[in-house]
Image (spheres, helix red, strand yellow):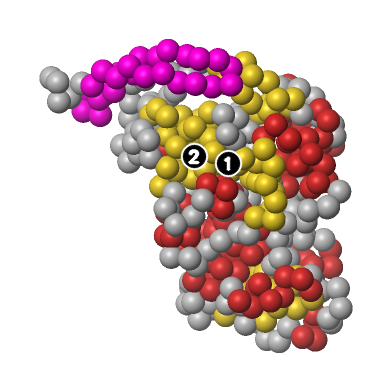
Amino acid sequence: MRSLLRFNQHKISTTAGYIEGLRYSSNRLGFGIRSIVTTCRAVLLPRFGGPDVLEVRDDVRVPDLKPNEVLVRVRAVSVNPLDTRMRAGYGRSLFESLLPLILGRDVSGEIAAIGQSVQTLNVGQEVFGALHPTAMRGTYTDYAILAEDQLTPKPSTISHVDASAIPFAALTAWRALKSTARISKGQRVLVVGGGGAVGYSAVQLAVAAGCVVSATCESESIDRLLAAGAEQALDYTSEDLEVRLKGKYNAVLDTIGIQQTEQLGINLLKRGGHYMTLQGESASLSDRYGLVIGLPTATSILMKKQIQYRLSHGIEYWWTYMRTDAEGLDEIRRLTEAGRLKVPVQKTFPITQVQEAHQAKDTRIIPGKVVLQVD
């Protein structure tokens, strides 16, 4: 029995205070977490607005773990465009009734506790991963909760800061290229907006898959994209893209999603190719008209475009979103470990300066990736 049941008494120090806890665990017998951290520090979004609405509180409740969940002691979280948009009111049709929220999707840290059905991860292990876009309790907190399949071991070759910048962006790109377009070796891929985190991840994923990759970007990103393996990187502010982009592509990932880039991508696709945009209209239409009208309207618009482009160009048209995927996360881990996938971090802030971090992103003072460090 001693080999199956372990009784550990430990002390956990948090900004909310000093907590004495008892942990029972047994993978074979299925005992869950009997007592864990009950409150911790977190950044709350009590209402929608500018960066000043974000509040750092020390006494935010930590929910009980479900059997498949993992409690992560957070060391770093990245600030994604989704975070700043949600803070400003994007997705209010879904989230407004649930305020206050905790923002944040990416995470890197150590496992503090596991649910009774978790099999592949262990307490004390360093991990990184990302929550689904609609998660209500995010990662801007000392202790985040994720499902087992939303986490993977962090490579020892990178820091928590660097690891936290990768999962959400890379999984967004992976879902588009691998799950939707199913790219394969020798195919041609165009990434519109390759300088951002999702676009840069997409270029690296496509190169790793053996594809021939072209990308559009601003001038400062050209060298980085070429170094990542892109055959062609063009400055969309000064180049005639319709002239410079030669031939047809099997897949186009459009991270910009305006009318001009949509038409560019559609016209450059081979028959049977896939056009994927990150700028789907489901959330914006739901925010404007409410869920009851907005979602059916968005579905109708999407279906109309899919039929239109299938008939006129013989291609598939998609609105693509990040979705957690254990297979994708495992590939992202392997590529990261091999040094073939990275998302450069431009600046870090302590989590207590979250307002300043959001202000820097809103005003584009820092165009690159921003990470919040949690100490």
Residue 155 or 327: which is nearer the viewer? 155
- Horizontally, residue 125 falls left or right of residue 272, namely left
Specify the quadrant of the image occupied by residue 265. Answer: bottom right
Q: Position of residue 83 (x, y in %)?
A: 71, 40
Q: Position of residue 250 (x, y in %)?
A: 60, 75
Residue 273 or 277: which is nearer the viewer? 277
Residue at figure coordinates x 46%, y 29% from the top left: 71
Residue at figure coordinates x 37%, y 19% from the top left: 10
Q: Position of residue 75 (x, y in %)?
A: 54, 38
Could you tell me if the residues under marks 1 and 2 are in contact, i.e. CB atoms within 8 Å? Answer: yes
* Marking on residue 181: none
Identify residue for label 2: 109
Identify residue for label 1: 76
Q: Position of residue 49 (x, y in %)?
A: 84, 31
Q: Quadrant of the N terminus?
A: top left
Amino acid type at mark 2: Gly
Residue at figure coordinates x 71%, y 87% from the top left: 246
